[in-house]
Amino acid sequence: MKADQCTLYHGGLKGAESVFGETAEQYGITEMIFTFEGHRLHRDKNPVVLSDEELLRGDISMEIASRMMNRTYYETEKIRRVLQTIFHMVNQGHQVFVVGTILEDNSVKGGTGWAVELAKLFNRPLHVYDQNQDQWFTWQDGAWKEDTPKISYNTFVGSGTRYLSESGRLAIEQLFADSFGK
């Protein structure tokens, strides 16, 4: 697969998403940044500002989101819009890459975990770089398995923590190098 035939979907936020975008740009990969009116982006290269109607397509009850992620999300408009935006990213990208922390209950810490849960729900190839373990994992047969993934679909999601470590940055860069050559 050629990099210039691929599209990366992300949310343009500080940390992992910006590094996914910067790295994709170096490889000539098309970048689609989903956002909503009034949301501040760290990387704002050609953002797609979702309308209220488009956001509603990704709507979910906060109770269901809380249950799926084993944590409590309170009903705030911003959180709801962020989760709706993540829906559009995962809905468009066939393969999902996330940088963060895998928790004991197999969820991923923070809002990033919503991309992970949607990828599981949509049966997308799912890969998480756990910064605490300094290792990539792939979701397979209901469990995380150590892996060295490659980008193997022409549409993919890059998401993750705002608190990207140096090892997380290097993992993203290595993912692209392994997938498309140096």
Image (spheres, helix red, strand yellow):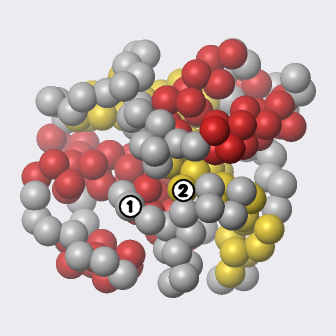
What residue is drawn where x is 80% and y is 68%? 146
Asked whether residue 68 is in view, the answer is yes
Dot 2 amino acid type: Gly
The image shows residue 37 at horizontal and vertical percentages of 17, 30
Q: Is residue 60 above or below residue 70?
A: above
Q: Quadrant of the C terminus?
A: top right
In the depicted view, which residue is nearer to us: 89 or 42? 42
SS of the residue at dot 1? loop
The image shows residue 12 at horizontal and vertical percentages of 41, 31
According to the image, label 1 marks what residue? 110
Of the image marks 2 and 1, the number of the one nearer the N terminus: 2
Instruction: For the residues labelled 2 and 1, say whether their Cβ atoms are less than 8 Å apart.
Output: yes
Q: Is residue 66 above or below residue 152?
A: below
The image shows residue 55 at horizontal and vertical percentages of 23, 46
Dot 1 amino acid type: Gly
SS of the residue at dot 2? strand
What residue is drawn where x is 65% and y is 25%? 23
Q: Label for residue 153?
A: none
In the depicted view, which residue is nearer to us: 120 or 112? 112
Q: Residues within 10 Å of mark 1 (few under 14, many from 20)?
A: some
Q: Quadrant of the N terminus?
A: top right
- Tell how many labels: 2
For residue 44, which quarter of the picture? top left
According to the image, label 2 marks what residue? 100
What residue is drawn where x is 73% and y is 19%? 27
Q: Is residue 123 above or below residue 104?
A: above
